[in-house]
Amino acid sequence: MKPLIEVINLKKNYKSNNVFQDINFNIKKGEIKCIIGSSGSGKTTLLRCLSLLESFDDGKILYYGNSEITSMSQEKEKNEVRKKIGIVFQDFNLWPHKSVLENIVEPLMIVNKLEKNEAIKKALKMLKKVDLENKKDSFPDFLSGGQKQRVAIARTLAMDPEIILFDEITSALDPELVDGILKLLRRLAFEGQTMIIVTHHLEFASEIADEILFMSDGLIIEEGTPEKIFCNPKDSRTKRFLKTLKKHFQEINVYEGIENFRAFNIGFMRKIKSGGEYYVLGAAKEDWWKSMGEAQHEWHKIRESKKIKLKMIIYELVKSEKEILYKMPELTEYRLISKDTEVPSNVNIYDDTILLLIFDNERPTVIEIRNKDLVKGYLNYFHILWEQGRQVVL
């Protein structure tokens, strides 16, 4: 598969200073790359050059395997490429004198040449996707920062870009608004949207990215899977950067609804280290399978490819669990315990994270708690019950 974008020896100067130099990477359809690094490392300028909003001085960018753009390329060629690339900025860039709906409709009519009725229909569909259909007649000044950012994302999605670039889109938001935006990006990831995301949220990046690029002083210092970058960085500059951003407090996140539930579970499985073990205390019978729908196939595909072992303590073996045991016997182990044993149902344990799963018809919920002491306590209890349980052998 040819990359959607291939960057070759890209260089950008500002006056006598190098903004970045010798940048090389590519991204294929459906991939997600996160760019991390301190302020001034060239991340934002790189995105602006990729979207052709800013010129570069040397090197070239290949788009879709056939469009080659250099610093000398004609504006007409660049405009054709720009139509396929979406970019979302940290400062929203909405027209204050136009309503939410108009902010999305106008570009569809001007750039994509859609008729007004067709543009309105598409805009409303995108507003529904970001849960802002009820704000279509509001003006930006009457929206929260998180709502403005969701409008900006809806406007970009409406243009049907092949790839979307996100530039620190949570940095201008209050902390309580950040989670909603990150949940939306998780949903886009689950839907297969190709994305390059500049972010300082390392936990989010480790969960969502196929590859991490660490930039410092205008160079890509290190690149690789989240596991490689966050668990085994090679360069001393990467190690110093990660050390400054480590968190030591408890973090609690809540993900509600079918799409968020599925996107989180897929993302969390991507985040687990290859060869790791994932523990489940009190299975959900068929509820988890129903809530995941077709997404369960992707979940199991990731688990199988990364050889993640699942250890589960259950009261009874249901059909779906039996099928997985047949399919991946070397990676799946169940222990049956008495129904008289009181178990905190649907507790998932991995590394420093506890996941509590709640199933409520069409609105399943994941409560993510990152607390090493809590994990230690639950894991000790898990091992006690594990020793008491009876191994399931088919």
Image (cartoon, grey):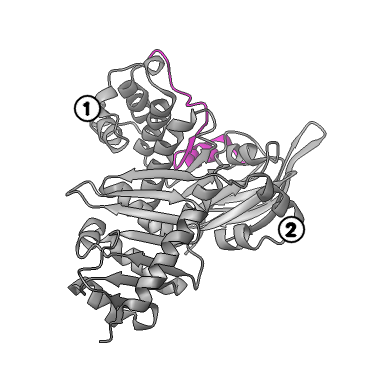
- Classify mark 1: residues with Cα within 10 Å, few (<14), some (14-19) or many (20+): few
Residue at the spot 33% in from the left edge and 22% down from the top edge: 100
Instruction: Tell me: residue 287, above or below residue 75.
Output: below
Q: How many marks?
A: 2
Which percent across, then down, holds residue 77? 53, 41
- How far is disc 1 from disc 2 in space, using C-alphas? 54 Å
**Magenta stretch: residue 195 in it?**
no
Which percent across, then down, holds residue 242? 66, 50
Residue located beneath label 1 in the image: 117
Q: Magenta part of the protein: which range?
A: 72-97
Foreground residue, 221 or 378? 378
- Classify mark 2: residues with Cα within 10 Å, few (<14), some (14-19) or many (20+): few
Foreground residue, 371 or 253? 371
Foreground residue, 146 or 80? 146
| Sequence-earlier tag: 1 or 2 | 1
Q: Could you tell whether 338 is left or right of 45 in the image?
A: left
Which element type, helix, strand or loop, lies under badge 2?
loop
Q: Could you tell whether 108 is left or right of 287 in the image?
A: right
- The answer, for residue 311, to whether it is visible in the render is no
Foreground residue, 117 or 371? 371
Residue located beneath label 2 in the image: 235
Q: Could you tell whether 217 is left or right of 106 in the image?
A: right
Instruction: Tell me: residue 312, above or below residue 188.
Output: below
Residue at the spot 56% in from the left edge and 62% down from the top edge: 227
Residue at the spot 45% in from the left edge and 75% down from the top edge: 307
Q: In the rendered view of the protein, which quadrant contains the C terminus? A: bottom left
Which percent across, then down, holds residue 104? 35, 27
Label 2 is placed on what type of residue?
Asp
